[in-house]
Structure formats: C-alpha cells, structure tokens
Amino acid sequence: MDTPEFILRPATAEEFPAMWDCMVDTFAEIPHDSDREAEASLFEPERSLIWLDGGAIVGTGGIVSRDLTVPGAIVALAGVTYITVAPTHRRRGLLTRLITRQLSDLHERQAEPLAGLWASEAAIYQRFGYGRSAVRAILSGDTTGLTFRAGVQPGSGRIRRIPSEEIRPYAEHVYDALRPQLSGHLARPPKWWDRRLADPEHYRQGHTAIRHVIHEEADGRVTGWAAYRIKGDFDDFRPDGTVRIHDLYGLTPQARAALWRHLLDHDLVRHFLHRMATPDSELPHLVMDPRAVRTELTDSLWLRLVDVDRALAARRYLVDVDVVLEVSDVLCPWNAGRWRLTGGPEGAACVPSSDRADLTLSTTELAAAYLGGVPLNTLAAAGRVTADSPAALRRASTAFGWDSQPWCPEVF
C-alpha cells in the first residue's frame, strides 16, 4: 500500500501526540491537552494507520473496538475514527488506500464483520461502501409554547439532582438496562464512560457545567437519567435562557415524561435544544402543540459491511426471510456475488448461492438498511435497489425492518 513517495503503517503509542497534532490541524480545531490525553487513553496503536511523507505525518486513521446493538443482537464493531489527510496531500488517493487497507485487514483477520463511523462530510464515505444507517433528531423550541397534554402523568416518582462526581453508577444502570434494546447504541466500558462524562471548561461555550438528574421511584429504584446544561440570558424585558440536553433515558414512559417536564419547566429558561435525540422521540406526542417541537433529522452512524455473510447472519429479522441478494462491491471484491439470506427473529444464515437473484444492490444499500432504519423499498424507489418482483422486495423490506428506529447518540 506504500507509494514511491509515502509510507503507510501503524503508529506507535509514542507517535500519538504527533498524530493528534495532524488531526487537530486538519479539522481546524483548537488543541487542548486534556482532549489529547483523553483520546490517548482510548488509542489502539496496532489498529491505527498513518501516512508518512519523509518524517512528517500527513494522514491518519484508526479503529476503536466497540460493541454495537443491532436488531436482535450485539455485534462487534470496528469503530473507524481519526480519519484525516493533510490539506497539502489531498487528491493523491491517500484516503482510498487507507480505507482499503483497514477493510482488507479486518477481512483477512476475520475480525469485526462491521465497520462504522461518523462522517465529517456526508458525500465522502458512500463511495467506500458505507451507508447512512442511523439518523439523529435535533429537537428545539420555545419552552413557553410547550404545554403538556392533560393525560401525561409523570407517575409517583421524583426527580433528584445528583452531583457530577456521584452520577456514574446511576447513569450506567439506566444506560446498560436500555442499551440491548436500542439499535445503534454502543457498549461503554469504563474508559468510554470516562469520555462520556468528561466536562472540561472548553466544552461549555458559555453554559453551566453539566447537571445530572435521576428519576427515582417511591421504592428507591432508579428508572431514569438526564444530563443537561443551562445558559442564562436576558433580553430587554424577560429571562431568555436555554437548556441544552445531552442525555435523556427512561426505563418507563412515566420516567421519560417526568424528565422531559423537569428539563422544560426550568425557571428563567425560554429555549431548549437536544442535538442527539432519538428520531422517534415521544416529546411531540407529550405536548398539546406538536409544532412547538421543531424536529430536524440528520445522519449519525454510517456502517460498512466488511463481510456480507458474517454481517447479515449476525442480526435478527423482523419476520422470516428467504432472499437471494446479488451484491456488488468494488472496494471489497470478496463480497461481490450472490448470497442467500435465510432467517427470522431467532437467527439467520447467509451463504453463497447460484440461484436467481431476488434483489440486486451494492454493499452501500445493505449497510443503509442494516439497522432497520432505511427500508429497502425506499432505496428501490430511489433506484438504488432492483427487485425481481414487487413481492420479493416487500418481503425483504419487511424482514430488514425493526420495531424501533436506530439511534446512535455517541460520536467516536
């Protein structure tokens, strides 16, 4: 994968500061020692790649080892991150060769069947077989226009403020109870919880430090957790503050409703913003005027099927499925060809086939549909999936669906 001019190889742990400097420079970010130290604790040198021009690092890439909730299962995910090419070295094919090396290494080692990333630019990664697998909702509005429906009952529990240094066991309890059900969510070992709960001053942008509350039942059981900041402000006549929500999880509808009411009923606050909300949030259905909740959808997690057979066999399917897929994959030729997928709610298998194809598509479309958020029939309507018959498309589209929208609230 080297060129006469450049060398592509893994970085060492000692090279991480230089690698970090290259990344920060390319993303035009302000460097902070605490950020570099936090990322260094998560860095896996043997899974990294750097492009060298002479002694200088001019391109970076890496993988972090994660576990991802997919429909009906937990699957190992190669979390692709640190992807940069220095502005002086663009348009030379370095990114293509780096991504190809990552995927080839995963395939040859039979490591994770899936790779995933957050895309800095949405147009880049589809050409490498990544599909937009999950979206997030950006919820915002004026709290003065929010009136909760009369039937919304927060239950008999209470909201309790917890100091930041004490919140971790409560947050872990709630998150870990829900994560196996939430397609698109990632496991959080201790170092990832350290990252999630970090709150350095430069994160705040004029807001308060993160505040944490829990929802506690009368018997002491913790059934919800929320994390948020407030930015106080006044216009010429009245308070004009903003509450910015980072996390909101409830084990019961009553807990979620109580947390929403707490966050949106703050004194001196007129605006709210939640940039990492689930796309099927209950909030518009809790209030009298759904239009008072402005909802924008944008991409979050992009997935790539490293090995079609292993990836498709790893998840479960909403209904029984028996379909032959004609798959194209220019970057990973081992995936190209016909595959017979059989399975259902209890498990699945995917094997090579010589039978006539029911659907024709690329790995980009398979990745987009993988978590159940993008129906295959929607992709067919866009001309990206070809079906042998409407019935075959309908059956496959139903099987690939799931009972909730995939949602990934964690950038890596």
Image (tube, rainbow, N blue to C red):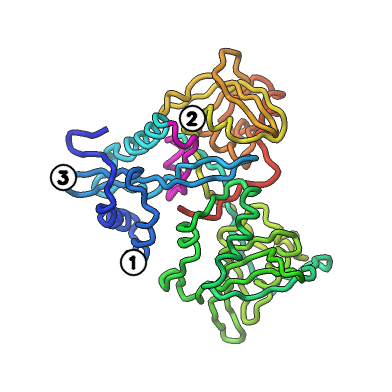
Q: Are marks 1 and 2 in contact (CB under 8 Å)?
A: no
Q: Which mark identifies residue 307?
A: 2
Q: Which mark identifies residue 32?
A: 1
Q: Is residue 122 magenta?
A: yes
- Nearer the observer: mark 3 or 2; the answer is 2
Question: Which x, y percent locates residue 130?
Answer: 48, 38
Which image quarter holds the N terminus? Answer: top left
Residue 383 can be seen in this image: no
Q: Earlier in the sequence, mark 1 or mark 3?
A: 1
At numbered mark 2, what does the secondary structure look like: helix, strand or loop? loop
Q: Earlier in the sequence, mark 3 or mark 2?
A: 3
Q: In the picture shown, does residue 312 fall above or below 250?
A: above
* Residue type, mark 1 in image: His
**Residue at x 28%, y 46% (from the top left corner):** 11
At numbered mark 1, what does the secondary structure look like: helix, strand or loop? loop
Kindly indicate the quadrant of the structure image that contains residue 178: bottom right
Q: Earlier in the sequence, mark 1 or mark 2?
A: 1
Query: Disc 1 and disc 2: Cα gap in Å?
Result: 38 Å
Near-viewer residue (49 or 365): 49
Query: Disc 1 and disc 3: Cα gap in Å?
Result: 27 Å
* Residue type, mark 3 in image: Gly
Question: Which x, y percent locates residue 320?
Answer: 71, 28
Near-viewer residue (330 or 76): 76
Judged left or right of residue 105, residue 304 is right
Please report the bounds of the magenta region as a residue range. 110-128
Q: Which residue is mark 3?
A: 54
**Residue at x 79%, y 70% (from the top left corner):** 156
